[in-house]
Image (cartoon, rainbow, N blue to C red):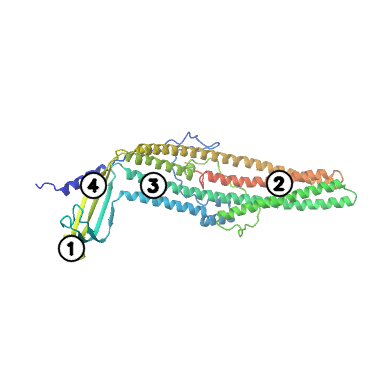
Amino acid sequence: MKRPTSITKLGLSLAAWTLMAGCAVGPDYHRPEATTIPPAYANATNGWKVAQPQGQLSKGNWWEVFGDPELSGLESQAAAANQQLKVAVAQFAEARATMDVARAGLFPNVGGGFSATRQRVSPNAPLTTTGQPIGQPSTFNDFTVPLDLSYEVDLWGRVRRSVESARAQARASADDLEAIKLTIQAEVALDYFTLRALDSEQAVLRSSVKVFNTSYDLTVDRRNGGVATDLDVAEAKTVLKTTQAQIPAVALQRAQLEHALALLVGQPAATFRIPERSLSAAPPLIASGLPSELLERRPDISAAERRMASANAGIGVAKAAFFPTVQLNGLTGLESVNAGTLFNWSSRMWAVGPNLTLPIFEGGRLRAGLRLAKATYEEMVASYRQSVLTAFSEVEDNLAAQSFLASQYDAQSDALIAARKQLEIANNRYRDGLATYLDVATAESTELNIEFSTVQLRGQQLVASVTLVKSLGGGWQESKQQ
């Protein structure tokens, strides 16, 4: 039986090291409890289950539920040209590249090259590579075609934990991208509906100015006829001018929102225009009994969970630094002092062997690195739990807003009907000489304020609907009864 050669022994040793590389120091990731989860939303009928991060799922064109083609057009423009979104896309590409860099550590590094040198060895060197006696100079050529191989045997899982951490960071970056998309989509819808509410306010003011101007002219005519007094004329003019003064203020707010929308859709504010149009459609009703899976789709929660997993893997990387690093090195190729014989079989050369590095004294750097990794993980856990609590709070706020604003709008609409009737009666009494213009002015101001508030409430309802969709992580659908 043949005795094993040195190469055979080395191969067996490498195989043993490879088998040992199956372990990885550091804790395996297990998602911690998020926080105390209520069994349901307030007024909700659906229960909750343990969440799985799904922030990367498509949210769909959720804005189409509002049935506004102009809004859909603005959303498309923002998706194509928003510069903040382009930054997020680039950051996601960076994270994926970082993950690929870390994953490359799982494979051997192989490199080749070519070198040609002519050198002179000092006669005072203790040894010479050409066999010349000591004390005599030596000049020669050296042609080399090397092929290098190096591979870190991942005995303690340092490379695998690094890949695990980088992969979780890449997934968090994907969630960040979805979060920015959702934020931009919601901001476009919020600014758009706020702008349309201002258009409605302007329409109310302009209509009121026409009515008040007619009343003013009528009062002047009545004063000239000796029926009305100068006080009546002053009161009519006050109501008219006060209403006219509100139009520029609303126009300024509209211009600012138009400029904000221009920025969101990636266009210059100087050339971007949205034609005026009052609000027409009622906000969609979103059922309060929403399934718990929708919170899973919130990309900020998903990103926080991914970063928690990345920090957990970072603990393993920090622990692996305490253990020896084993590097396998190999070299083969051709070398000759003569270019003509470089590619001869006799010019071949090779070398192979392991390299072991063991940390002995690091001045506390490794222990500090481990403490840093553990503290980072605890930070990510707290951040994850805070994200969940924030999500619950936002959903509850917007569900309440949807309910209470609807009730307020109904009551305000009834009040507007009553105010218009009051104004009609006051005008009739004034024409019949049964009341002063003060009664008319009071009724006009009341009617204008209530109509103004009604228009604002409609805009607030639409804004609350958009904010609720955003707080739920995007589009929604009602759960089917099982």
Mark 4 or mark 1: whose residue is earlier in sequence = 1
> Residue 285 occupies which quadrant of the picture?
top right
Q: Is residue 348 left or right of residue 36?
A: left
Q: Position of residue 93 (x, y in %)?
A: 43, 53
Residue type pointed to by label 3? Arg
Most foreground residue, 239 or 125: 125
Q: Can you identify the residue that label 4 sits on?
A: 354
Residue type pointed to by label 2? Glu
Mark 3 or mark 4: whose residue is earlier in sequence = 3
Q: CA distance from mark 2 to mark 3?
A: 55 Å
Question: In this view, which residue lies farthest toward the bottom?
Answer: 340
Q: Is residue 114 left or right of residue 74?
A: left
Q: Are marks 4 and 1 in contact (CB under 8 Å)?
A: no
Mark 3 or mark 1: whose residue is earlier in sequence = 3
Q: Can you identify the residue that label 3 sits on?
A: 167
Q: Which mark is residue 380?
A: none
Which residue is pictured at 42% across the width and 52% down the height?
94
Q: Nearer the viewer, mark 3 or mark 4?
A: 4
Residue type pointed to by label 4? Pro
Q: Can you identify the residue that label 1 sits on?
A: 344
Which residue is pictured at 62% across the width and 52% down the height?
257
Residue type pointed to by label 1? Asn
Most foreground residue, 69 or 143: 143
Q: CA distance from mark 4 to mark 2?
A: 84 Å
- For the question of whether residue 436 can be seen, the reply is yes
Q: Which mark is residue 451?
A: 2
Judged from the image, the secondary structure of the residue bearing numbered disc 2 is helix
